[in-house]
C-alpha cells in the first residue's frame, strides 16, 4: 500500500546545504529522495544520481524517481548549483553556459518533468536562490549572479503558471557555509557587512525551505535568509 507520508526530492543532497535540507525534512516526517552527482547520500528513502547540467539530466532524474516506485511528489527542492567566481574577461561562452545550465535551466526542466506528480499531490517547489544575483549584484560573479537572477524570476513565472495546483517559492540565503579555503580576512570583512553580524547556518536555510513548503497561502515568494545582508549594499561572494 502506498505510504501516506509526504515525499520530498532534494537535489544536491549529498553535501553541505543540500544535505542539511534533506536531513531536516527527513527529521520532520518527509520521505526524502536525495539526489547527488558525486557524493552519494546515505540514510534516505532513496538516493538517485544525475548530472543536472546535461540537457537530458533532469528528465533522467525524473525517470529514475518514478522507476524507484514514487507515485507522489509533495516537495521538490532545487538545491544543486555551481558557484563560479570569475571576472568578465574570463567569462567565455562555456563558463556562462555552465552556470546557466545547472543553476537555472535544470530547475526549470526538473519541475517540468515532475509536474504531473507535483500536480497530483498539490505539492510545491522551493528553489534555492542566493542573495547574490537573486537580490543584489555582486562584483566578479556575473554569470553566477545572472543564473540566480534567472532562477528568482523563474520562481515567480512558474508560481503564476502553475497556480493554483502547485506553489513555487524560493529561499535566498546569504552566507551559511563558507566556500572551502575562503580566506579568514575576507570572512571578517564580509561578516562586518551583515546586519546581524554573523554568517548563518545550513539549518537556517532548511527551516526556511520547510516553512515555504508548508505555507499553503504563499506562492511566488523569495525569502531572504541572510541576516539582512541584502539591505547592506553590494559586494562580492
Ligand atoms: N553555501 C552558502 O553559504 C550558500 C549561500 C547562498 C546560496 N547557496 C545555495 O545553496 C545551494 C547549496 O550550496 P552549497 O554551498 O551547499 O553548494 P556546494 O557545496 O557548492 O555543492 C554543490 C551541490 O550541487 C551539486 N552539483 C554540482 N554540480 C552538479 C551537476 N552537474 N549535476 C548535479 N548536481 C550537481 C553537488 O553534488 P555532488 O557534490 O554530489 O557532486 C552539490 O550537492 C546552492 O544552490 C547555492 O547556490 C549557498
Image (cartoon, rainbow, N blue to C red):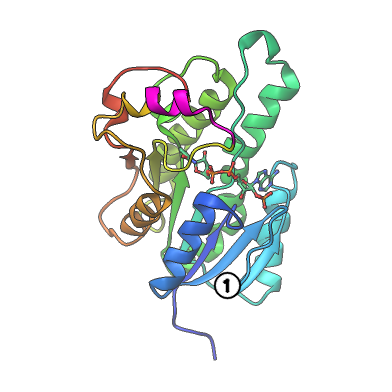
Quadrant where ligand 1 appears: top right
Most extreme residue toward the top is 89
Q: How would you classify the magenta stretch by its main secondary structure?
A: helix
Residue that carries the numbered disc 1 in the rendered image: 44
Q: Quadrant of the N terminus?
A: bottom right
Q: Quadrant of residue 117?
A: bottom right
The number of numbered discs placed on residues in the rendered structure image is: 1
Q: Per the image, is 188 magenta?
A: yes
- Give 36 or 166, whichever is nearer the viewer: 36
* Residue at (31% x, 24% y) in the render: 193
SS class, disc 1: loop
* Residue at (59% x, 74% y) in the render: 43
- Give 133 or 203, whichever is nearer the viewer: 203
Q: Position of residue 174 (x, y in %)?
A: 39, 36
Is residue 78 visible to the viewer in this orientation of the structure? no
Q: Which span is picked out in magenta? A: 181-189
Image side of residue 196 versus residue 57, left or right = left
Is residue 41 visible to the viewer in this orientation of the structure? yes
* Residue at (40% x, 31% y) in the render: 131
The answer as to whether callout 1 falls within 8 Å of ligand 1 is no
- Give 74 or 92, whichever is nearer the viewer: 92
Q: Per the image, is 45 magenta?
A: no
- 125 lies above or below 5: above
Q: Position of residue 148 (x, y in %)?
A: 50, 31
- 234 lies above or below 168: above
Q: Position of residue 161 (x, y in %)?
A: 43, 44
Q: Residues within 10 Å of mark 1 (few under 14, many from 20)?
A: some
Most extreme residue toward the bottom is 1
- Give 99 or 156, whichever is nearer the viewer: 99
Q: Position of residue 12 (x, y in %)?
A: 60, 52
Amino acid at each position: 500500500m502506498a505510504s501516506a507520508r509526504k515525499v520530498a526530492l532534494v537535489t544536491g543532497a549529498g553535501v553541505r546545504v543540500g544535505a542539511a535540507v534533506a536531513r531536516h525534512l527527513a527529521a520532520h516526517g518527509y520521505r526524502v529522495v536525495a539526489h547527488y552527482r558525486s557524493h552519494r547520500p546515505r540514510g534516505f528513502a532513496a538516493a538517485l544520481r544525475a548530472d543536472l547540467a546535461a540537457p537530458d539530466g533532469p528528465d533522467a532524474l525524473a525517470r529514475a524517481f518514478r522507476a524507484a516506485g514514487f507515485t507522489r511528489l509533495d516537495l521538490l527542492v532545487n538545491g544543486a548549483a555551481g558557484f563560479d567566481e570569475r571576472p568578465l574577461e574570463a567569462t567565455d561562452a562555456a563558463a556562462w553556459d555552465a552556470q546557466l545550465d545547472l543553476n537555472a535551466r535544470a530547475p526549470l526542466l526538473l519541475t517540468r518533468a515532475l509536474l504531473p506528480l507535483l500536480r497530483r499531490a498539490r505539492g510545491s517547489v522551493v528553489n534555492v536562490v542566493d542573495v547574490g544575483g537573486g537580490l543584489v549584484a555582486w562584483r566578479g560573479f556575473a554569470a553566477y549572479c545572472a543564473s540566480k537572477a534567472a532562477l528568482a524570476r523563474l520562481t515567480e513565472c512558474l508560481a503564476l503558471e502553475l497556480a493554483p495546483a502547485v506553489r513555487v517559492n524560493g529561499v535566498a540565503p546569504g552566507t551559511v557555509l563558507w566556500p572551502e579555503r575562503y580566506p579568514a580576512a575576507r570572512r571578517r570583512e564580509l561578516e562586518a557587512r551583515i546586519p546581524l553580524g554573523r554568517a548563518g547556518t545550513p539549518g537556517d536555510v532548511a527551516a526556511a525551505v520547510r516553512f515555504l513548503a508548508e505555507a499553503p497561502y504563499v506562492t511566488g515568494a523569495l525569502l531572504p535568509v541572510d541576516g539582512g545582508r541584502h539591505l547592506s549594499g553590494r559586494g562580492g561572494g
